[in-house]
Amino acid sequence: MPCQTFDPRDDYKAEADKVTRLLCMVLKGVSPHDIRSFPVDLQNWWTKHQEEDRRRLRYEAQKRVTQRAKRKALNKLTPEEKRLLGL
């Protein structure tokens, strides 16, 4: 799963994304009970990160459904209809 930061600044984005993916991978292996022993700011980051991941996964799933529906609809068109639509 490609975990990412969504900071619009590009200066350190690649490095921040790398560290975010690494931290996400590590924290996924830690039990919720053990995470409670981590610093509060890390606990808060992890909670927010998991919410963002769930949102992103829902968005990606919906996008796949939409793309499949679009592909299915386009497959019904004749070559002439596709030409007329500029496809």
Image (cartoon, rainbow, N blue to C red):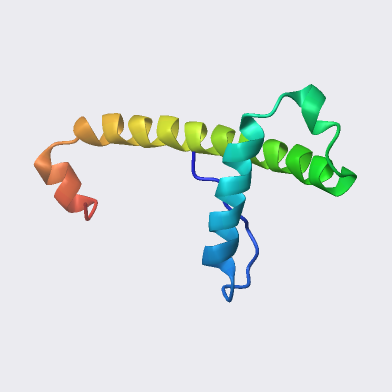
| Image spot of residue 21 (x, y percent) | 56, 48
Question: Measuring 15% from the left and 51% from the top, which residue is drawn there?
Answer: 83
Vertical relation: 75 (above or below) 33: below
Can residue 29 be seen here? The reply is: yes
Q: In this view, does 29 lie to the left or right of 47?
A: left
Figure disc tally = 0
Percent across and percent down for residue 18 are 53, 56
What residue lies at 86% left-to-right and 44% top-to-bottom?
A: 39
Q: Which of 72 and 10 is in front in this view?
A: 10
Image side of residue 7 versus residue 85, left or right: right
Relative image position of residue 76 (x, y in whole percent): 21, 30
**Front position in the image: 12 or 84:** 12
- Image coordinates for residue 86, horizontal then vertical, percent: 22, 55
Position of 40 with respect to 55 (left or right) is right
Please identify the residue farthest to the bottom as the structure is shown: 11
- Residue 56: quarter of image: top right
- Residue at 85% of width from left, 31% of height from top? 36
Q: Do we see residue 55 in this rendering? A: no
Residue at the extreme left of the image, as rendered: 79
